[in-house]
């Protein structure tokens, strides 16, 4: 199942959609007569309803007659007729991120003359909830805060079931699905502060989406191609199989002694090709268009806009 959050031109209220054959089906309207009780109206509501609800929605939406006038005029929409939001527009917590999770990225960001040091445990940091941005919305550039904006395409994991001290073998039972994250970074802040939180957390610095693909449909998360282009020029191209710590190892490490909860978002790190790693470094400029793509999910397309 491919789920999204969207709104209509005449109603900005975000709502839960399921993408079927190119149409975005409004779950609450389309399933009003077939859902037992009140149908979830947001992705967070669906996730927290649990696996039985996920499977029920996936089954019911396949049988929706999108041409049935009794379901109302807003039961299904073409993608170009709606506004796409980040799947979870306002997470309840910081987004958990992995740093240095691809050996090639560790190598390209190592200081000159120093041997790259591959992490032996996952390197965690977070991005503030206010970074979340839509899959096609502008990335705001506050030039009073930073002059060195960089890009990072990453596979995002959406936690579906609460858990603590989760084993690798059990990890997939705790995953709702996967999405695309662009971990936009202010490098001057990142290194000037001596830690990563501020440089990763400027407003709008986390485009996400356009959909979440449920784990059962997505398949093996360590066998997907990911890439990023700037103005059509490919800068990053790799496979998730290159991760130092795969998704199951990330969940095992993160949850050891710490509860992860339904709706939590984890960004799993980026491969080589970032602007910082080029010689000389090549940061984004006003008006640049950044396209981040992951096989089986889709593409983010955002323009950097200086304010």
Image (cartoon, rainbow, N blue to C red):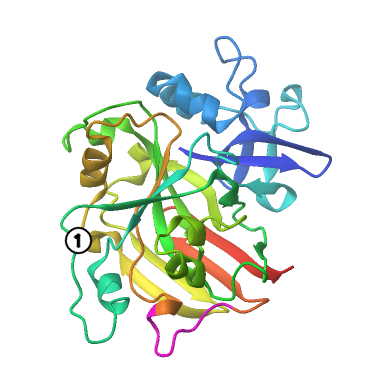
Q: Residue furthest right?
A: 10
Q: Position of residue 28 (x, y in %)?
A: 64, 24
What residue lies at 50% left-to-right and 57% top-to-bottom? 198
Quarter of the figure with the C terminus: bottom right
Q: Main secondary structure of the magenta part?
A: loop
Quarter of the figure with the N terminus: top left
Q: Residue furthest front?
A: 193
Q: Nearer the viewer, residue 89 or 147?
A: 147
Q: Is residue 271 visible?
A: yes
Q: Position of residue 110 (x, y in %)?
A: 28, 77
Dot 1 corresponds to which residue? 119
Q: Residues within 10 Å of mark 1 (few under 14, many from 20)?
A: some
What residue lies at 44% left-to-right and 43% top-to-bottom? 213
Check residue 279 for magenta coloring.
Answer: yes
What residue lies at 61% left-to-right and 14% top-to-bottom? 38
Task: Tell me where the magenta segment starts and ends, as one range.
Answer: 277-284
Q: Nearer the viewer, residue 257 or 21?
A: 257
Q: Is residue 150 visible?
A: no
Q: Position of residue 258 (x, y in %)?
A: 29, 31
Check residue 204 for magenta coloring.
Answer: no
Q: Is residue 303 left or right of residue 91?
A: right
């Amino acid at each position: 199942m491919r789920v999204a959050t969207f709104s209509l031109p005449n109603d900005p209220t975000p709502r839960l959609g399921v993408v079927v054959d190119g149409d975005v089906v409004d779950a609450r309207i389309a399933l009003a007569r077939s859902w037992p009780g009140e149908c979830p109206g947001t992705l967070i509501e669906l996730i927290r309803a649990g696996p039985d609800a996920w499977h029920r929605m996936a089954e019911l939406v396949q049988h929706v007659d999108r041409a049935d006038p009794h379901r109302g005029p807003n039961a299904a929409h073409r993608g170009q007729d709606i506004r796409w939001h980040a799947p979870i527009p306002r997470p309840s917590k910081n987004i958990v991120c992995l740093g240095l999770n691809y050996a090639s990225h560790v190598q390209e960001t190592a200081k000159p003359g120093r041997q790259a040091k591959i992490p032996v445990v996952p390197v965690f940091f977070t991005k503030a909830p206010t970074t979340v941005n839509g899959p096609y919305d502008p990335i705001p550039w506050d030039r009073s805060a930073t002059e060195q904006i960089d890009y990072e395409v990453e596979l995002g994991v959406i936690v579906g079931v609460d858990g603590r001290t989760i084993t690798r073998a059990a990890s997939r039972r705790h995953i709702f699905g996967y999405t695309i994250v662009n971990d936009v970074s202010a490098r001057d802040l990142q290194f000037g502060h001596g830690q990563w939180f501020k440089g990763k957390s400027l407003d709008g610095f986390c485009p996400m989406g356009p959909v979440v693909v449920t784990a059962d449909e997505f398949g093996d998360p360590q066998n997907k191609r990911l890439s990023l282009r700037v103005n059509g020029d490919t800068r990053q191209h790799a496979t998730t199989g290159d991760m130092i710590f795969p998704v199951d190892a990330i969940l095992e490490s993160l949850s050891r002694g710490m509860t992860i909860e339904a709706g939590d978002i984890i960004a799993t790190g980026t491969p080589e090709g970032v602007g910082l790693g080029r010689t000389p470094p090549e940061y984004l400029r006003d008006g640049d268009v950044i396209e981040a793509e992951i096989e089986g999910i889709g593409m983010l397309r955002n323009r950097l806009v200086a304010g």
